[in-house]
Image: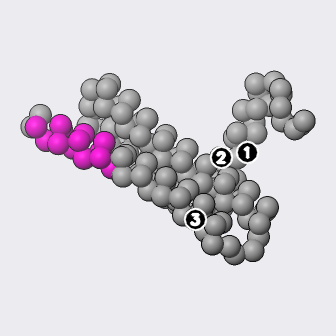
Amino acid sequence: MSEQKNQPLLARVRCAWWGLRYGLRSEHSLKFQVTVFVLLIGVLLILRPEPLWWALVLLASAGVLAAELFNTALEHLIDHLHPAIHAQIRIIKDCAAAAVLVMTLGAIGVGVALAVHLLRRL
């Protein structure tokens, strides 16, 4: 059984925090996405949209960050288990990257919808 199974909540949160820190140190895409997220929070604070828009932007942003972290975890697992280049492995990695792309496009869609909403308020 894994030493991380059935750990107290605080220990599990520490592991998750370590994973986030590792992702931020090692993944340029995640660094960029977190930077965009911080800028988005600033824009939301300035524009002050309704709470529903905050929820949609935060949910979409969290989805992008989570997808990127899943992608990072999957890539590291695959590279550990099968370090050689293989056509099937490439498909798995490409599909994981596509999941991040799909989530990112959805988040951009939320941003465009918010921009349209805010422009109509003017």
Residue 40 in the image: above or below residue 88: above
Q: Is residue 8 visible?
A: yes
Does the magenta-highlighted stretch encompass residue 115?
yes
Q: Residue at x 49, y 40 (%)?
A: 62
Give amino acid for label 1.
Trp
* Residue 110: % across, % down: 31, 42
Q: Quadrant of the C terminus?
A: top left
Does the magenta-highlighted stretch encompass residue 33?
no
Q: Is mark 3 on a helix, strand or loop?
A: helix
Left or right: where 83 falls relative to 58: right
Per the image, the residue denoted by label 2 is 20
- Which mark is in front, 1 or 3? 3
Main SS category, magenta section: helix
Q: What element carries label 2?
A: helix
Residue 47 in the image: above or below residue 35: above
CA separation, marks 2 and 1? 5 Å
Per the image, the residue denoted by label 3 is 91
Give amino acid for label 2.
Leu
Quadrant of the image occupied by residue 1: top right
